[in-house]
Image (cartoon, rainbow, N blue to C red):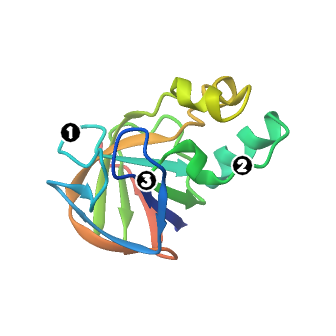
Amino acid sequence: MGHLLGIAIRHKKRGEMQELTGAHVTVKTGVADDFRGKPGNRQVTVLSMEDWQATCKEINRTLPWPTRRANLYIEGIDLYNTVGQHLHIGQLVLLITCETDPCKRMQEAHEGLFEALAKQWRGGVCCRVIQAGEIATGDRVELINAL
C-alpha cells in the first residue's frame, strides 16, 4: 500500500505544471483541466517517489517532481512491469497501459535526466481511467493485479 503525494496538471502543450491538493478524475477528461485528459491509454500519468529519488540521485541533482510532468506522484508502489494492473486511489481506478517513456523535454530540464529516466520504468506509467473519482493528496494507493 502507498499514498498519493502530489497531483499536477498543465493547461496546454509545453505549459507550466500546476500542483493541486485535490482533483476530480473522469473517464472522459482524465484529471480535470489537464491538457492530456482526453480518453485513451495515456490519459493519466503516474510517477513513483522512489523512482524519482533514484533518478535525481543518479544525476546528482534534487529536482521537484513536477519536472517529470506527470499527473500523479505516489509513494510505496513499485510501478516496474505493471501493465494490465489497476491502481486504486480512493474511489478512482486506473488501468496501467504502458511505461511512460521520457521525452526530449527531460534533457532540456537537466543534463542526463532523459537517460536516467529511461532505466527500469523510472519515468512512470501511463493509465486509462476505468472508474472516476475524487482524489486528494494523502489518499491511499493500492496496486491490484487485474490479470
Mark 1 or mark 3: which comes first in sequence? 1
Kind of element beneath mark 3: loop
Give the residue number, with chain letter if any, for mark 3: 71
User: How far apart are the two marked residues, 1 and 2, measured between alpha carbons?
Assistant: 29 Å
In the image, which disc is placed on residue 48? none
Mark 2 or mark 3: which comes first in sequence? 2
Q: Residue furthest right?
A: 60
Give the residue number, with chain letter if any, for mark 1: 40
Q: Image point 25% across, 70% down: which residue? A: 133
Q: Would you call the spot at circle 1 few (<14 residues within 10 Å), some (14-19), or many (20 or more)?
A: some
Q: Residue furthest left?
A: 28
Kind of element beneath mark 1: loop
Asked where in the image residue 90 lies, by quadrant, the reply is bottom left
Q: Would you call the spot at circle 2 few (<14 residues within 10 Å), some (14-19), or many (20 or more)?
A: some
Instruction: Identify the image quadrant of the C terminus.
Output: top left
**Residue 132: image location, x then y, percent:** 21, 65
Give the residue number, with chain letter if any, for mark 2: 63
Q: Image point 35% across, 46% down: which residue? A: 85
